[in-house]
Image: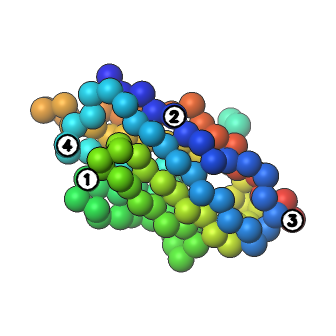
Amino acid sequence: QVHLVESGGGLVQAGGSLRLSCEASGSISSINIMGWYRQAPGNQRELVATISNGGNKNYAESVKGRFTISRDNAKNMVYLQMNSLKPDDTFVYYCNVRNWNGYRYLDYWGQGTQVTVSS
């Protein structure tokens, strides 16, 4: 079982920056992918960025060049630096760990942190 806690969301003006943090605890495999997803109420959760245990990164096209994902394996933390924020970035952001349990990947989710970008 994995428990995730996000922090760092808030209200920011367009063009500003925020840094999201997520701390993972529990039975975290050395083989895992950590990431950030975002969701508006009633909508599908969408990928923002992921980073593997080996450091391979993947970004949604809408955030490339603006957001940077990173992780600290010793601390079991993942971060999302968000620059040049737009009102279209207004979502609840969720931390995710895709955890290898020996025969399959299991997904774990944080509680979400609100990011609101004003015009």
Task: Estimate the spatial distance between the alpha carbons at disc 1 and disc 4, rounded to whole Å.
Answer: 7 Å
Q: Earlier in the sequence, mark 3 or mark 2?
A: 2
Quadrant containing the N terminus is top left
Instruction: Check disc 3 and give the amino acid type.
Output: Ser
Q: Is residue 77 visible?
A: yes
Residue 111 % position (x, y): 57, 31
| CA neighbours of label 1 inside 10 A, class few (<14), some (14 to 19), many (20+) | some
Question: Please, what secondary structure does the residue beneath circle 4 have?
Answer: loop
Q: Earlier in the sequence, mark 1 or mark 4?
A: 4
- Residue in view at x 68 percent, y 72 percent: 84
Task: Estimate the spatial distance between the alpha carbons at disc 1 and disc 2, rounded to whole Å.
Answer: 19 Å
Q: Nearer the viewer, residue 21 or 85?
A: 21
Q: Earlier in the sequence, mark 3 or mark 4?
A: 4
- Residue in view at x 23 percent, y 59 percent: 54
Question: Please, what secondary structure does the residue beneath circle 1 have?
Answer: loop
Residue on which disc 2 sits: 5
Residue on which disc 1 sits: 53
Residue on which disc 3 sits: 119
Task: Estimate the spatial distance between the alpha carbons at disc 3 and disc 4, rounded to whole Å.
Answer: 41 Å
